[in-house]
Image (cartoon, grey):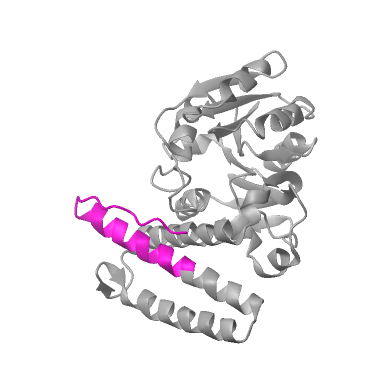
Amino acid sequence: MLTVLFATRNGGETLPGVLECYCGLQAPAGGWRLVIVDNGSIDQTREIIDSYQPRLALTYLFEPEPGKNAALNTGLASVAGDLVLLTDDDTFPNRDWLVRMRAVADAHPDYAIFGGKIIPRWQTPPDSWILSSVPLGAVFSVTDPSALEGPTSDHNVFGPNMAVRTDIFARGHRFDPHVGPRGSSYPMGSETEFVKRLIRAGFLAWHCRGAVVEHFIPRSHMRTSWILSRAVRFGRGKYRIGVLERGPLGVRWLGVPRHIFREMIVQQVRILTALLGFDREKLFSARWQFHYLWGQAIEARIMRAEGAGCSIIEDTIR
């Protein structure tokens, strides 16, 4: 037995297609079940899920506390079997996804974490500059297409397609609710933080090239403004995870490591140079890096306030 677990919040746009995919999945040896945690949806999410109850071995749960990781932690109480497959409400699995992941987990009993292949499902064909300049893994949660089957690290295990042996959760490991999607402003990297923590505890990770899903990329996520907001969240996550691993980073001004200010000035110069040279690719690269650093600065301030038992108002980055 294995369990597929995902959280959803206002997933009405993609859930019907995703659940239709689940109805056509090949069943692995031992069978499978599906657990969906509704994280405070106000659209038709509940009605959509209920409509698939007759066709799927499906458990519906509701978690009002905002945050994907809070919802996943709630769902762990309802998983069954020896393997939990984690995914998202906008991810479409190949028909043999469960069978492939089951086979790899059975073939490698010394490994406890499995990351599958993630390819983009574009709502509309992306502009060429997106494919050439945007870091697709950080922005769209797709894996490196050249990644080979075999042992891997946290860099190739992403939330839309990963599996964890339930024994890990039986030992008390949980997802950190301070990382990952919580509204529009949050530090990215919840799965990365989780996998890094497990690897430090001695667990091993494996890349399953044959277990494939498609991650839906809506038209709105191909806009420059959305991509740069993703850079901010990516920077926030990188900073928080770095501090959790190594402690505060360097000499700080106003709670922010001094080197971040210096690097932001460098990127501002790069932005100006690219504007004067009408170089769109270099301009985007500099803007991405600047927003990434801005995110790090924001998270440094937030973590400083958390450490002092304070609260601060986060800046809205556009």
Q: Which residue is drawn at 54% across and 69% down?
A: 288
Where residue 239 sits, quadrant-wise, is bottom left
164 or 21: nearer the viewer: 21
Residues 73 and 12: in front is 12
> Residue 270: x, y in percent?
52, 83
Q: In this view, does 312 lie to the left or right of 195?
A: left
Q: Where is residue 185 in the image (x, y as percent from the top left)?
A: 43, 50
Does the magenta segment cover residue 171? Answer: no
Instruction: Tell me: residue 246, above or below residue 60.
Output: below
- Residue furthest top in the image: 54
> How many numbered discs sit on the rendered protein?
0
Q: Nearer the viewer, residue 71 or 182?
A: 182
Residue 57, image x, y percentages: 66, 18
Q: Note whether residue 27 is visible.
A: yes
Asked if residue 141 shows in the view, the reply is no
Residue ID at (62%, 44%): 160
Residue drawn where x is 48% and y is 39% of the image: 68
Which image quarter: residue 83?
A: top right
> In which quadrant of the rendered image does the N terminus lie?
top right
Q: In this view, does 144 lie to the left or right of 173?
A: right
Q: Is residue 126 above or below residue 272?
A: above
Does 311 lie within the magenta span?
Answer: yes
Range covered by the magenta-colored residues: 291-318
Q: Residue at x 52, y 79 (%)?
A: 271
Q: Is the magenta stretch mostly helix, strand or loop?
A: helix
Residue 123 locus on image (x, y percent): 73, 47
89 with respect to 172 (left or right)? right
On screen, residue 88 above or below 220: above
